Image (spheres, rainbow, N blue to C red):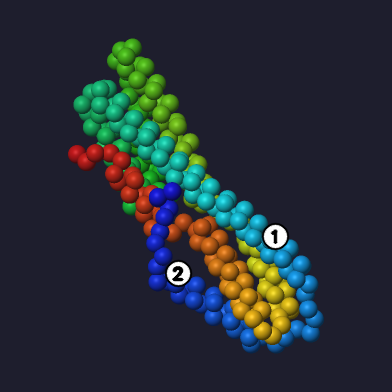
């Protein structure tokens, strides 16, 4: 999924180092607990935690794939409208329609905020231009029906894209995951014994922090990912 790929940056490295430092502090500085947690209980806790986080990460990835597919479908239909309009109507209608179509692409390619707000007005201009077309013969009537159907498809795809962009992991899910992570970390700290086992606790707690961070990053649409989506609109139609 190329549109949503991003390189590891400096802030990612700082976060990873920070997680490791916190894990070391928790393992070596938190006072020992007077009771031991059975190792089997910790294993089951970790397995369940891993399963739930993996499920939520997969849901977040599916959401991003849906956004990418919805945008791709919309762009195909927008190009179809542009191609069909080339042989329809008067010069004045084609000029008005093409201007509305390019204005919509330009607006969506700016910022995600404009996609949700100002671009809605631009899309209405496109749809109004389509509805204002008056077929002159049977051929244009058939092509006009095709444009109407395509415009309706674009409206549905826009609605799906906006819904996916606005959706995110519910706060309740975060509360459950963070609470579960605290239980697992508490169990690890409660089972500490002197020796090499402490290094395993550090690695496990660090892994829990990194896994939660991966879930947060996957769930969030970064500015780079949004920009990649917007660039697809700016290059969808040939420049006049």
Secondary structure of the residue carrying numbered label 2: helix
Q: Residue at x 80, y 81 (%)?
A: 35
Residue 186 position by quadrant: bottom right
What numbered label is drawn on residue 180?
A: none
Looking at the image, residue 184 lies above or below residue 147: below
The residue under the point 40% across, 71% down is 10
| Res 17 visible | yes
Q: Which residue ends up furthest to the front in the rendered image?
A: 196
Rendering coords of residue 228 (x, y %): 36, 52
Residue 25 percent location from the top left of the image: 60, 84
**Residue 79: quadrant of the picture:** top left
Q: Is residue 193 above or below residue 51?
A: below
Q: Secondary structure at mark 1?
A: helix
Position of residue 123 relative to residue 216, above or below, is: above
**Mark in the foreground, 2 or 1:** 1
Q: Answer with left or right where residue 182 lies relative to residue 37.
A: left
Specify the farthest residue to the top: 138
The quadrant of the rendering that contains the C terminus is top left
Q: Position of residue 92 (x, y in %)?
A: 22, 28
153 left or right, relative to 95: right
Classify 10 Å Cα crowding around label 2: few (below 14), some (14-19), many (20 and above): few
Q: Which mark is residue 12?
A: 2
Q: CA distance from mark 2 to mark 1?
A: 26 Å
User: Which residue is at a point 43% across and 53% down the rendered structure image?
Assistant: 4
Q: Nearer the viewer, residue 45 or 83?
A: 45
Which residue lies under the disc numbered 1? 48
Q: Residues within 10 Å of mark 1 (few under 14, many from 20)?
A: few
């Amino acid at each position: 999924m190329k549109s949503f790929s991003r390189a590891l940056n400096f802030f990612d490295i700082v976060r990873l180092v920070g997680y490791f430092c916190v894990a070391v502090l928790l393992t070596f500085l938190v006072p020992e607990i007077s009771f031991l947690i059975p190792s089997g209980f910790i294993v089951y806790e970790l397995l369940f935690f891993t399963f739930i986080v993996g499920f939520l990460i997969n849901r977040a990835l599916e959401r991003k794939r849906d956004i990418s597919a919805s945008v791709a479908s919309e762009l195909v239909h927008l190009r179809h409208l542009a191609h069909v309009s080339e042989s329809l109507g008067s010069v004045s209608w084609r000029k008005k329609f093409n201007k509305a179509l390019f204005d919509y692409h330009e607006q969506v390619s700016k910022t995600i905020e404009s996609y949700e707000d100002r671009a809605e007005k631009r899309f209405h201009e496109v749809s109004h231009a389509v509805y204002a077309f008056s077929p002159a013969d049977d051929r244009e009537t058939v092509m006009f029906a095709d444009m109407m159907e395509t415009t309706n498809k674009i409206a549905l795809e826009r609605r799906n894209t906006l819904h996916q962009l606005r959706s995110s992991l519910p706060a309740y899910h975060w509360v459950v995951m963070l609470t579960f992570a605290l239980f697992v970390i508490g169990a690890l700290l409660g089972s500490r014994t002197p020796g090499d086992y402490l290094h395993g606790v550090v690695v496990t707690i660090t892994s829990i922090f990194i896994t939660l961070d991966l879930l947060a990053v996957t769930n969030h649409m970064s500015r780079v990912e949004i920009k990649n989506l917007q660039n697809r609109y700016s290059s969808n139609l040939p420049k006049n």
